[in-house]
Amino acid sequence: MPANRFNGQTSYGIGIGLRVPHYSHILSKKPVVDWFEIISENFMVEGGRPLALLDQILEQYRVVQHGVSMYFGSADRPDRTHLRRLKGLARRTKTPWLSDHLCWGSVDGTYTHDLLPMPYTFAAARRTAEKIRQVRDYVEVPVCVENVSSYVEFHASEMTEWEFLTEVVELADCGILLDVNNIYVSSKNHGFDPYDYVNNIPHHRVGQMHVAGHTKFEKYILDTHDHPVLDPVWKLYAHATRLCGVTATLLEWDDKIPSFDEVHNEALKANEFIDGAKRAAV
């Protein structure tokens, strides 16, 4: 299965998040891992232990940066200090791409520290795409935007979420970090078919995928990242892989984090679905 335009990293394989409970194991045991995803904001500092640890990781492993505070959908212009630190970190890690979320979360410099859903309007798509281009041009690294899980919708929306995602990435000429779990969570919360979502995005723009666990409550599903991936999400991931090609994939496990081996073994389950997609393509 050939690489698509935004995924020249078909050999990147399966990654996991670099998390504090696993630091000691990774540095002492040096397990074989395809790559680690780091939260950029945790390392956008002038020095100290975070960067010293990151440099030790970089001696042996590939690293991809993932952000949580760019808020591409916010009306504010990108913060220059933030961008300068982000660019410096990107040069340090040599990350092949950067990712952050298709959401908003700040107003006039005040940050919510949450990934809030956007109104799916053409005006919002244009503003968001402009901000993505500004970030990409300044940092000089390809950008992939991630779809978020959502629990509310806006009456002002003019299109579906997948149509909005498509509009944004086409206008910005950027990639997609396709979070398959987030699609499934939102589909159950809002009553749409997750396969309609995956079928109707520009597959050639998918440069990375996320899988994760979620929690079912009586009236909604919450994106908790605190246990293994559920079967419906793996099935949706397999379908996305058949459509998008072999794509760098990350398992997110951010709460109630078990041992390194348990997290890594759960992530490696993705290879079963990748192999199935390869066989189907023959």
Image (cartoon, rainbow, N blue to C red):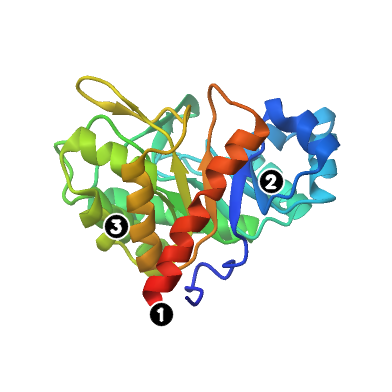
- The crowd level at tag 3 (other Cα within 10 Å; few <14, some 14-19, many 20+) is many
What secondary structure is found at the residue carrying circle 1? loop
Tell me if residue 5 can be seen: yes
Q: CA distance from mark 3 to mark 1?
A: 21 Å
**For this rendering, which residue is in front, 23 or 170?**
23
- Mark 2 highlights which residue? 84
- Mark 1 highlights which residue? 282
Q: Is residue 162 left or right of residue 104?
A: left
Q: CA distance from mark 2 to mark 3?
A: 34 Å
Where's residue 199, x and y in %? 26, 62
Q: Amino acid at mark 3?
A: Val
Q: Which mark is residue 216?
A: none
First-in-chain label (3 vs 1):
3
What quarter of the picture does the C terminus occupy? bottom left
What secondary structure is found at the residue carrying circle 3? helix
Q: Is residue 259 left or right of residue 114?
A: right
Where's residue 131, x and y in %? 46, 51
> From what the image shows, is residue 239 above or below residue 27?
below
Q: Which mark is residue 198?
A: 3
Q: Amino acid at mark 1?
A: Val
Nearer the observer: mark 2 or 1; the answer is 1
**For this rendering, which residue is in front, 221 or 48?**
221
